[in-house]
Image (cartoon, rainbow, N blue to C red):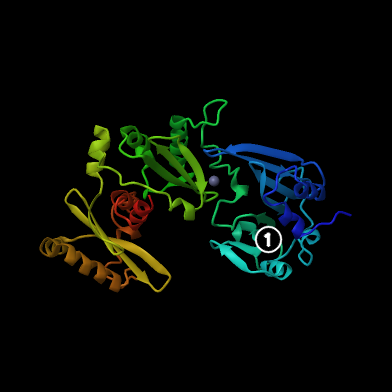
Amino acid sequence: MTQRGLSLLLDSLTHAEQDPEVRALTAAFGGDPVEVRERLIGAPAVRSRRMLFASGGEIILHDDAVVEVLLHVVPQSPKQQGVDLAEWLPGAGNDATLDDLNAAIGTRRGFAGIGTPWFAVDGAFVRADFRDRRGWNEPGNLESLAITVEQPGLVCAPDDDDCPRCADLLIRWDASEEVDVEATDQALRSARDAGDLKEDLHWVPLDDLRMLHGSGLMTRVESQLTCRSCRRVICFALQRDGAPSFTYCSVNDARRHPLEEIPPVERWGSPERQAAAHAAMQYVDHSPGAWFLVRQGERLYLDARYSYSALIDTSALIELDASERESYRRGGHTYLGELAYRIHMSGPYQEESPYYARDLYRGGGDPGRDYRSEVSAAIVNHTWLAQQRSQQG
Ligand SMILES: [Zn+2]
């Protein structure tokens, strides 16, 4: 009988398909795969190869190096059956709970986000996937174990390579690995408009990306959009002196990308784009880490950050009323600091606060408006994220 166990899975990581470590694993999985899927991911392109075995095993390679091995308790294809987990992890059956896995693996446990437990084992990681990313205290919810090179949550999971919502949005010129920028831009916009992707307005809006790039005013322009299924962040960047890049990132990596200050719209926008910018909210002033003042026409809005213990750290958006506007006219920047402090101290997350009902982020104001997105777009050059980016860029 073939020797199975966690070490056989771990030993295969980072090896090529023809290496003895991977051939040994393939043999333990029962020989030839019943299904092989290949695709190019991103630009610069990485070749993803997934081999699904009848026994419930799966091997994923990136550019011919194993990056992940999966044991599927729940079969992924009609040609596959579920693994017998006890063969690979003595002491744990297919109905293992998280505590059972903990006892069987016996190493440090961590969580990627709320619903993704993992264990650190010999410099690699064992991720446990439970149904709907919960229910790990009841038997029968375990779907798979994934053995990965990288710590879950810090980089994208290779098993998301085929995400049905976001895997086919990079369009290449026929028979080449090069990005068709116009077609890719279109595909991303369609996916965003269909609700498959959420655009992050701390970056260049997708609608401005090619216009800004075409102006030559920035060396690098980047849009970021998050997939609503797999949560990977698509980072699409156009460079003045280089090829476009299209990468799938974790939130952690995506926010570390450099972004230069976006030049004033008058220098690069079409007449329509300039008109839209003038009608939209515009940045007026801010105090780092505390508040932003934006205006729209004659109206003034204060985005005031507030926190409560370690659980709440967010902001409220208040339109200044007549007396506050008058105080601002007299007191300027200092007055806004005092007002933001008053908002924070009132605990605007509770109904007793006079600012609770005025908080436009709570759904007041014009229905259908996404105030948070509008403010994000207005302050893009001034957020702490922008400061962090310009320091690194
Ligand atoms: Zn996705």
Q: Residue at x 11, y 60 (%)?
A: 329
Q: Is residue 177 left or right of residue 378?
A: right
Report whether residue 32 is seen: yes
- Compared with 43, 308 (above or below) is below
The mark total stands at 1
Where is residue 203 shown, x and y percent of the image?
37, 47
- Residue 33 horizontal/vertical position (percent): 77, 42
Which of these two is toward me, 332 or 96? 332
* Residue 241 higher or lower than 319, as above or below: above
- Tag 1's secondary structure? loop
Residue 251 vertical placement versus 268 (above, below): below
Where residue 278 sits: x, y (%)? 22, 42
Q: Quadrant of the image for the N terminus? A: bottom right
Mark 1, residues whose alpha carbon is within 10 Å: few (<14), some, or many (≥20)? many
Q: Position of residue 315 (x, y in %)?
A: 33, 63
Is residue 75 rendered to the left or right of residue 168? right
Q: Name the residue at 16% across, 51% down.
A: 298
Badge 1 amino acid = Asn
Q: To which residue does mark 1 refer?
A: 141
